[in-house]
Image: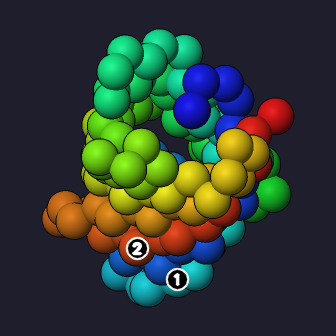
Amino acid sequence: MLGTWTGMSNSAVSGAGHFHPTEAGKEKAVRFRSVEYVMVIDKEEGRNFVGSIGATNNKHSTDAKRKEVLMGAYAKDMKSGVMVNETGSFTFKLADSKNLEVCYTQVSASPKVASCFEMTKK
């Protein structure tokens, strides 16, 4: 898992937050967003790892550049597991050494997010 991973999310979002700001007056609308993410895993020990994840794209006027601490743990198979950042939780599955499938959920007053996407190791 060590290294830099990139991918474009496919998200259903309700409300506004750091990675999913919204335009004035549209805070309650459910919308679909694609945000480019970079995940850097810089430390691994046993079945645990730590790094950061951040949004990088500026394709939309509401996109924000932000980075959060990310912590994770592998399941027994060492190919799947869970991760958590400051705002939500992830499940993941390593398809192979260069491809990662990720799903993210955030359940809070605002925003609520459901997202699944693929990341590629650089």
Residue that mark 1 sits on: 31
Q: Is residue 50 above or below residue 58?
A: above
Q: Residue at the far bottom: name it.
A: 30
In this orientation, which residue lies closer to the viewer: 8 or 50? 50
- Image x and y of residue 86, in percent: 29, 37
Q: Residue at x 33, y 64 (%)?
A: 105
Asked where in the image residue 56 lies, by quadrant, the reply is top right
- Image x and y of residue 33, in percent: 61, 72
Nearer to us of marks 2 and 1 is: 2
Is residue 35 in view from this perspective?
A: no
Q: Residue at x 67, y 24 (%)?
A: 3
The label number, if any, that marks residue 114 in the structure image: 2
Q: Could you tell whether 48 is left or right of 100 in the image?
A: left
Q: Give the class, few, some or many, for how many residues have Cα within 10 Å of label 2's Cα (few <14, many ≥20).
A: some
* 2 and 1 marks in contact (CB < 8 Å): no
Mark-to-mark CA distance, 2 and 1: 11 Å
Q: Secondary structure at mark 2?
A: strand
In this orientation, which residue lies closer to the viewer: 120 or 38? 120
Q: Residue at x 42, y 43 (%)?
A: 78
